[in-house]
Image (cartoon, rainbow, N blue to C red):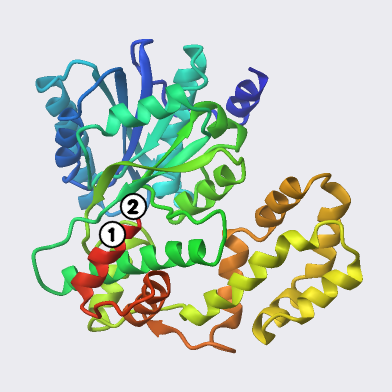
Amino acid sequence: MKIFDRYFEKNPLKFFPDFPDTLSLIIVIPVFDDPDIFHTLKSLQNCRLDRDVGVILVVNHAEHCDEDLKQRNHQLYIALNDFLKNSPVAGLYCNVFAAFDLPRKQAGVGLARKIGMDAAAWYFYQSGKEKGGIASLDADTLVDENYCRELADCFAKTNCAGMTIAYEHVLPESGEERLGIMKYELYLRYYRMALAYVGHPYAYSCLGSAFAVRAADYIAQGGMNKKQAGEDFYFIQKLIATGRFFHLNKVKVYPAGRISERTPFGTGQVVRQIVNERGNYVTYHFGAFEVLKSFFRDIPQLFKVNGIQIKACQEQQNKCLFRFLEANNFVEMVEELNANCASPKLFLKRFFDQFNAFRVLKYLNYVHPLYFQKQAVEIAAVGLLEKIMHRPVSRNLPDLLTAYRERDI
């Protein structure tokens, strides 16, 4: 396929994986000074396998890292090779790649994930299996026993471009870190469920340890980006727009819930922030989401209407949303969609491709604090859950997180 050739001309491989030609799924794991990787590998070794599965471990660090860290990473690379040599598992094939001294401006989890995922895509292309699956996992994340089986089945039996995977953070037994990760996971679930509540069709959580992509679609979307954090969010948005993206809830992954400085932002840094703020953590006011509910509900009515009617729709919105739409050329956007969409279904898809997760986030940041004040995450989460369940819910944080986990699978 020419698209693969063009991609690899622009993105030369850092290494060439050594696998048999029987794989149906490859799991890519960036490893940065993280001895928990051995627990993750044991978790994968305990998986039930119906098909051969590959694992690519990208042990990485930047050229400007201190020498102690570089030495630890080097020793970790050696220990991983020894571990895999001495504990082989039938049907599970592992490659370890040393991505050491990466350029300062590019080094990070995005580049490490890209190195591994590029290699996985190349393997499937060379094997004539462009529809093979590439899973993204983290070095501190455990998986269910049927993780490999379910992912391989999805790529073999559906035409999906990719998927997010159900998750639950592993909670520390007690203390400030436990409180921190509970509040952060509650925020993640609140945000996704709020998007679903207001009717946005692209309501997905984006975790680097909990998604997978088909090799052909990985290449078609330009591959993983090199962002030093948040690489998962940006890449998943492109997959969602294919219309062949879904959520897999038959299995779960279990990321560690701990303080970490391995990325500039993300789970570990947020937990640190919450601990430093003595447990305080605020998020977007539930009312800011509610403003979007009636707006999204009425969007189908804008198909093939004129500019005057589009402007009238804009003007009837809540003041905060009206100002945001006006500042972002809403009327012109809808007019352009109408000029290029022949059916209501296509119009609606293209609208949400435009008013996607980036646009929603831009809206939320626009209306806070001009029109809404951020709320404690527990208060916002209670407000949403009571709307959904039509009854009072417990304010107790563990109970609240449990309720969200049960609904947000």
- Report the residue marked by disc 1: 405
Q: CA distance from mark 1 to mark 2?
A: 6 Å
- The amino acid type, in three-letter code, at marker 1 is Arg
Q: Secondary structure at mark 1?
A: helix
Location of residue 380 (image quadrant): bottom left
The residue under the point 43% across, 22% down is 156
Task: Report x, y in % for residue 201.
Answer: 56, 54
Q: Nearer the viewer, residue 260 or 104?
A: 260
Quarter of the picture containing the N terminus is top right
Task: Report x, y in % for residue 185.
Answer: 30, 64
Location of residue 239 (image quadrant): top right
Residue 236 vertical position relative to residue 57 in the rendered view, above or below: below
For mark 1, does the 10 Å Cα neighbourhood hold few (<14), some (14 to 19), or many (20 or more) residues? some
Figure label count: 2
- Left or right: 343, with 12 as reference point: right
Task: Report x, y in % for residue 31.
Answer: 28, 42
- Left or right: 45, with 375 as reference point: left
Task: Report x, y in % for residue 51.
Answer: 30, 17
Q: Which mark is residue 199?
A: none
The residue under the point 33% across, 48% down is 166
Q: Look at the image and tell me whether residue 96 can be seen.
A: no
Residue contact at pointers 1 and 2, CB within 8 angstroms: yes
- The amino acid type, in three-letter code, at marker 2 is Ile
- Left or right: 308, with 34 as reference point: right
